[in-house]
Amino acid sequence: MSDPSTGPSADSPIEVAYLPGSAGATGGFDRAWPSAGELSVGNVETLSSIAALEARGISTVDCLVASFELSDGTAVDLLDALTERVDSPPIVLVVPVEDGSVPVEAVEFPFDAVVSIRPEADAADVAERIDRAVRRTIPPRSPRIEPDFDRRLAEGDLDDELAEGDLDGVDEWKRRVLDQLFTEIPLHMFVKDQEARNVMVSEASVGRRIHRFSDEYLGQRDVDGVVPVEEGREPYLDDLSVLRTGDPILEKEEHYPTSDRWFLTSKVPLRDDDGRVIGLVGVAQEITAQKHRERQLETVNHLVRHTMRNDLNAITGWLDVLREGDVSGDETDDEVLDRVRRIADGLCGKIDKQQAVVDVLTGPNETESRDLSWIVGREVAALDEEHGAATIRADVEERVSAVVTDDVGRVLVELVENAVVHAERADPRVEVVLENGGDEAVLRVLDRCPAIPVDEREVLTGTRPIDQLNHSSGLGLWMARWIVENADGTIDFRVREDGGNEVVVTLPSGG
């Protein structure tokens, strides 16, 4: 082995420590790798535990390949054990995928690469994917790299060589920059070949990628399943346009409806020394939060313009009637004034609600695990006391937690009050149900009110845009939706078969 302070030399083999973990931890592929496909260059040593790795000595290991479930802990424990070490090698995590998803820890913790394995995958294919992941986590070797390149670059000794075009220095400097860009900048960056297939994808943590882990993009076009087919066609046509015309596409907004995520994407042609287009380079920056905020501001603008202006017009009209003495029918002047007062009180209530909405939009959106059972119980008790004429029945499962913002209680308040206000009978009946749905907490509010019009439901769920001809007048329902969105939850408005409405809120489970 080479000196760990300088990394392995160009002609030294890669030293890999393999921790297969408990039986079946990677869908039965523990035994398939490395025996079915060892690294083309390198030595693989199988170790039984984290303790065995520490006993062996970590400083001589270039890369670790580990299952999530290990015999003496998990891969997260392994990560924690290496956190304080200056000679910590990269970790490639191997996880099974039964239902199209991976353990949440695989995304939440900074593993250097994640290889997901499906039950039907071929063992040789699994081995090849792990091999690729290992190679990508280790900086490429070049016989032209000088042993003291890092020191000379840091101290400025290479400035003259770089300025004069020294190829060895320039190539190494470019390689270092490219490696930093594709492994550390939190953007989705990619390089595609002449057929629009991904040949290089950034590995930096970007929270959530559009649909897949980075290695699952490799060799695939956007229409090959890395995104839903109906969503991948337009980006693929953009790829073809750049490849065929050589014209870049800069800062194009792309929307992925199935996940309601937005990206600002740029693509530029990649040319060879003769100027021929041989591929493209692109970067996609997520702007979902910005687009949601624009949608929220648009909504508040329409509600203010339409509902509040209507109230003010009504007040002005009735005052003109009083001034001109045109009160007709059985209505007296005092009754007209009472009508004006009710409209004004309602307008004040809408202004207060608007302020509450502004507080939600501009306030902190930090989420944490909270006892949703206790919150729902507290709000139901307060609502029951405030609306004495209403019957609010609660069926709350115990110990239901969710990762939410601290204003999550307002969701239930707004949904219940909306049902009470729109009830046709003097004794409104509302049912609140909270249950644990496994990976999510499910809150349902059921009423016997007239069905929310279909255009209102479509506007509230984002399937129909807000315009002057169709807009929802309920600020409370919008506020409920935005609070749920801030917690990465969903809200769905349904019409019950036996009459009334059912609002279903799903929130990420708090464990």
Image (cartoon, rainbow, N blue to C red):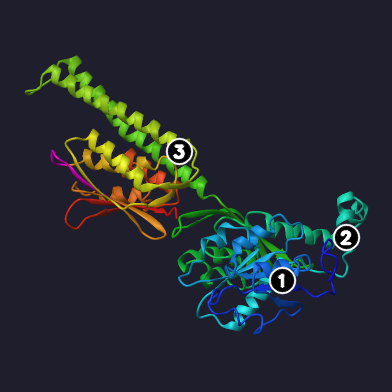
Q: Nearer the viewer, residue 13 or 447?
A: 13
Amino acid beneath label 1: Arg
Identified at 68% across, 75% down, the residue is 131
Q: Is residue 183 left or right of residue 315?
A: right
Q: What label does residue 135 carry, if any?
A: 1
Choose top left, top right, bottom left or bottom right for residue 298: top left
Q: Is residue 295 above or below residue 439?
A: above
Q: Along the polypeptide, which appears first: circle 3 or circle 2?
A: 2
Amino acid beneath label 3: Leu
Read off the magenta span. 424-433
Quadrant of the rendering where the C terminus is positioned = bottom left
Q: Is residue 5 above or below residue 472?
A: below
- Secondary structure category for the residue under label 3: helix
- Secondary structure category for the residue under label 1: helix
Q: What label does residue 361 carry, if any?
A: 3
> Dot 1: few (<14), some (14–19), or many (≥20) neighbours within 10 Å?
some
Choose top left, top right, bottom left or bottom right for residue 121: bottom right
Measured Cα–Cα span from mark 3 to mark 1: 45 Å
Residue 280 highlighted magenta (yes or no): no
Q: Nearer the viewer, mark 3 or mark 1?
A: 1
